[in-house]
Amino acid sequence: MRMQANTILITGGATGIGLALAESFLERGNEVIVCARTEEHLVHAKERLPRLQIRRCDLSKESERRDLHDWTISNFPEMNVLINNAGIQRVIDFKRGLADLDRHREVDEEDEIEINFRAYVQMAAAFVPDLIKQKEAAIVNVSSGLGFIPLTIMPVYCATKAAIHSFSLSLRHQLSDTPIKVFEIIPPTVDTELDKGARASRGQQDRGIAPGLVAKEALPRMEKDDYEIAIGRAGNIRAASGIDFDRIFANMNHN
């Protein structure tokens, strides 16, 4: 994948990994558009990176995903890279039944399956007919090492990331005879607000690597057409999932 002269849309691009990717791509001479649900985050991102293009979008809503597609293609017809990055992470105890599953939606109206998986699928389906017209194009899906060996306190999050890995494999195969390359970035734990402070509240000391380190490693590997980019500990988890799954699973979920 070329690293310059692209027009790139990054979902969830106003903070965390998305913003780090946006900054790195801007430094390489690309046009970058980011969307996010929170206007304040978008404003702060624009202040930090004045060349950034911003668009508010609630990716949990199908109608807004469709509007984002139409707005992007109308204003940036040369757009050739989609980075599906937006995500949320929730601790859910199924012994508490529907009450625990639904409690986050009652607070912020965000649903893990809708944002972490359905939005990725719909965004890909919406943009593929446009990307296929470009000379060079790419779809980049951000998954997680936890898609290979789950952390059971976050069962839905881990399941959606496993689904994204599977989806990326199928999408790559389907598009192999088109100009669209399909990448998967597989981060370890990253120090972001993905879980909205839940790590801190449960006393988790290891907050993960800085988002900039994800971008620093991912872009050079994308340039080399490395389609599955497992970063840091995520690479170890992915490897262990095939040879030592039970032991690593037990170590990760010992409490």
Image (spheres, grey):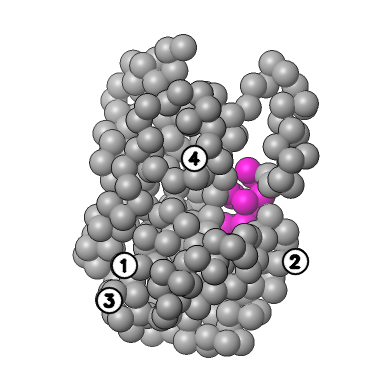
What's under tag 4, amino acid-wise?
Ala
As measured in the structure, the alpha-carbon distance from the residue carrying label 4 to the one carrying label 3 is 31 Å
Task: Check whether the beta carbons of the residues at disc 4 and disc 1 lie within 8 A of each other.
Answer: no
Q: Between label 4 and label 1, give the one nearer the viewer.
A: 1
**Dot 3 and dot 2 residues touching (CB under 8 Å):** no
Measuring from the top left, give residue 138's x and y in whole percent: 41, 70
Label 3: how many residues lie within 10 Å, few (<14), some (14-19) or many (20+)?
few
Of the numbered discs 4 and 2, the one sitting upstream in the chain is: 2
In reply to whether residue 7 is colored magenta, the answer given is no
The span picked out in magenta is: 112-123
Q: How crowded is mark 4: few (under 14 residues within 10 Å), some or many (20 or more)?
A: many
The dot on residue 28 is: 3
Cα separation, mark 3 vs mark 2, equals 33 Å
The answer to whether the residue labelled 3 contacts the one labelled 1, judged by CB atoms less than 8 Å apart, is yes
Majority secondary structure of magenta residues? helix
Q: Which amino acid does label 3 sit on?
A: Arg
For this orientation, the residue located farthest to the top is 255
Please tell me whether mark 1 sits on a helix, a strand or a loop.
helix
Give the mark, 4 or 1, whose residue is nearer the N terminus: 1
Is residue 228 left or right of 198 when viewed as pictured?
Answer: left
Q: Name the residue under label 4.
A: 162
Q: Which residue is drawn at 42% across and 26% down?
A: 204
- Callout 1 amino acid: Ser
Q: Element under label 3?
A: loop
The structure residue drawn at horizontal position 61% and vertical position 87%, both measured from the top left corner, is 74
Q: Which one is closest to the eye, mark 2 or mark 1?
A: 1
